[in-house]
Amino acid sequence: MQIQSKHYHTIWVKGDRSSIVQIIDQRKLPFEFIIRDLESPADCFGAIRDMAVRGAPLIGVTAAFGMYLALFHLEGKNPEVFLAETADYLKSARPTAVNLAFAIDEMLEFMLQNLNDEAIMLKTLDRANALKELEIGFSEKIGEFGLEIIEKIYQEKREPVNILTHCNAGWLACIDWGTATAPIYKAHQKGIPLHVWVDETRPRNQGARLTAFELGEEGVPHTVIADNTGGHLMQHGMVDVVIVGSDRTTVTGDVANKIGTYLKALAAKDNGVPFYVALPSTSFDWNMEDGVAEIPIEEREAAEVTDIEGWSGATHQSVRLIPENSRAANYGFDVTPARLVTGLITERGICKANKQDILNLFPEKKK
Ligand SMILES: CSC[C@H]1O[C@H](OP(=O)(O)O)[C@H](O)[C@@H]1O
């Protein structure tokens, strides 16, 4: 099915109707390009929980707009109580990505400080849009710093740089540019020859559907692979660098990312392949030190594992993949210990995955 897509941002306010926020519904990409209206915090909650929008920066910004939309539903309610309840409600949509809580807390604090301002709606919309623009700027800076890594590899090998990525940490996971894909786009736009190994990323197939869609739209050479292929490729010198995203990284450099990331990091370590994590400061948990012990790992519905979605021409289908009497477990994320991470690519530069180097880059976060 040919869809007419151009490079939108992933979320925006609908024209002059500022009571409607619009998103690209990612659940049917790349076969159906669906724009969906969100008109309430509940709409934003559902979009996040059901992964119509996904990716740490994007779910944070979506929740920020959810707090804004709450202002259209204040009728007869105590605003302080309703906004605090809305904040807790939106935070409960998904547990792992720390951007969600960061964005909601920022919005709630701002809204409570401006409750008596007659321009609160416009100011709150501006605040949500400011968070959106912040993430766009962070993503582009991550791209610029990550470009240096890819450029250095190319200067050494003078052949196309082979990059492996897991899940989708692209512009569809953010607002624009992405995190793991931002250095790829910057290098591609600079004419550096490269190729991307795209992990399909079971069970929701964000790599096969979304990263492949993004790279195809940008003309970036890529190959979709089964999730368990990366180790073999690294053993045979077919991967020059791994770049992934993050949903929550502790101040000590432990990285929560899509399930399977840890296994890629182990294979990279065993084969001497650099393993980088690209993330904005909004994806750090500054109050957490032991990621393996403390980062909440989302468990999603078993149906995402027992069934598989696909398209036959224009027809979307979901079919059973495993025996009816078999159970399935569906852990959404895992934690890669800092010791397996070569470096963190942030909007302020690249640093080692340890507390001292992270705080040297973000001194204002020192306790
Ligand atoms: C730039 S954050 C992208 C991050 O989010 C993805 O998870 P999900 O698709 O479940 O939201 C995955 O962990 C990506 O690396």
Image (tube, grey):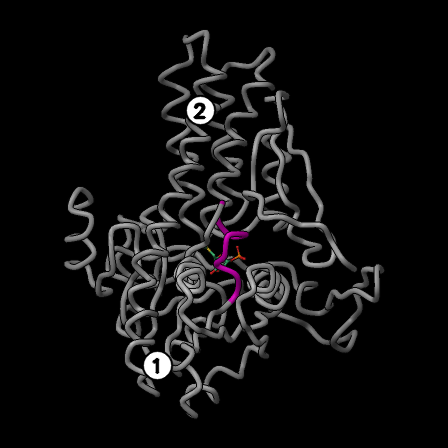
For label 2, the residue is: 126
Is 174 rendered above or below residue 237? above
Q: Residue 73 at x, y = what percent?
A: 60, 19
Is residue 339 toward the left or the right of residue 217 in the image? left
For label 1, the residue is: 158
Residue 170 colored magenta? yes
Mark 1 is surrounded, within 10 Å at the Cα level, by few (under 14), some (14 to 19) or many (20 or more) other residues, namely few
Which residue occupies 52% across, 61% down?
168
Is 201 rendered above or below residue 86? below
Label whose residue precedes the other's in the sequence (1 or 2): 2
Which residue occupies 76% across, 75% down?
325
Q: Residue 164 at x, y = what percent?
A: 45, 74
Q: Residue 366 at x, y = what percent?
A: 16, 46
Mark 2 is surrounded, within 10 Å at the Cα level, by few (under 14), some (14 to 19) or many (20 or more) other residues, namely few
Which residue occupies 43% across, 18% down?
123
Q: Nearer the viewer, residue 331 or 187?
A: 187
Q: Nearer the viewer, residue 327 or 55?
A: 55
| Residue extent of the magenta highlight | 167-175
